[in-house]
Image (spheres, grey):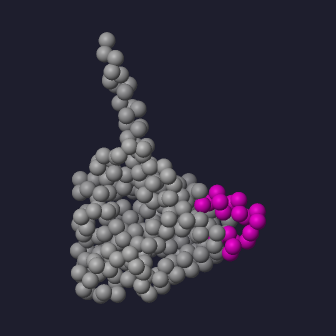
Amino acid sequence: MDGSGAGPGAAHPRLTAGYLTRLRLAASFLTILPIGPRTPASEDDLAASFGLFALVGFLIGGTLAIEDGILSFLFGTMIRSGLVVLTLVVLTGGLHLDALADTADALAAGGDRERALIILRDSSVGVFGVAAVLFWLGLQWTALAQLDGHARMVAIYMAPGVGRWAMVAVAAGLDYLRPAGAGSFLKPQWSGPNLRIASAIAVIAIIPAFSSQARAAAAAGIVVALAARWFYRRWLGGVTGDLIGAAGAIAEVAAMLAMASHLA
């Protein structure tokens, strides 16, 4: 009898381990949590983990919603909103805000493609970048402070998930403009599957929070993703990691604004 353990029963543990590896890769990239795989991941696992960004986003949102519920025993909506936004920035390592700042600075180059790409590679932050981050923080904080009760919980849960879904949607099928970095996630053969997986996760995640606010958040994320794809293609002819992250940050705050609006 073969003692290797191979056979139909062995496929399930391997499949489960593969999904867990990809989820850990996605979570370790999007958060500061030290939960990445202990052994080097394959290129396919790294590329496939991009499709799980939306799942990590909704997990972040759920965590923040729990935090907000606990803080409600101590503070009013304004202070809680600031603390929730602060936790989001700390938990994600400010990755999306760094990307937003770099993209805003690159926009100052106008139609000069090469200068814009140089600015995107520069780690320093200029005036446009600082202004973009301040506006993002202010809009996120004040929009959340407008909400209370069930609508508030939905907003906190939905916004990070919508933002991470938008990252996948923006990148799907567009050329990556750098030889390294986030390009490891953007293998062409994984583009379609990742978008389908991220979209399926988003649809399932919205079900328990389904409401007019949830629909408004989803619509805002879709609009931002489509607009960013069109703009990036015309502006630079593709995407970089910063452009993807900036689109996610904009989709996140757009979702929050949509839920806080009178139309939701």
Q: Quadrant of the N terminus?
A: top left
The image shows residue 257 at horizontal and vertical percentages of 53, 75
Q: Residue 76: within the magenta?
A: yes
Residue 18 visible to an observer of this rendering: yes
Q: In which quarter of the image is the C terminus?
A: bottom right
Taking the image as shown, residue 155 lies to the left or right of residue 10, namely right
Q: In this view, does 164 lie above or below 13?
A: below
Residue 262 visible to an observer of this rendering: no
The residue shown at (57%, 56%) is 62
Magenta-drawn stretch, dominant element (helix, strand or loop)? helix
User: Along the line of sight, which residue is nearer the eye, 206 or 141?
Assistant: 141
The residue shown at (55%, 65%) is 90
The image shows residue 177 at horizontal and vertical percentages of 24, 69
The residue shown at (25%, 67%) is 178
Q: What stretch is highlighted in magenta?
A: 64-81
Q: Is residue 101 above or below residue 207?
A: below
The residue shown at (32%, 80%) is 119
Q: In this view, does 123 lie above or below 241?
A: below
Q: Quadrant of residue 191?
A: bottom left
Q: Residue 226: within the magenta?
A: no
Residue furthest to the top in view is 1
User: Along the line of sight, which residue is nearer the eye, 68 or 26?
Assistant: 26
The image shows residue 29 at horizontal and vertical percentages of 43, 57
Q: Quadrant of residue 95?
A: bottom left
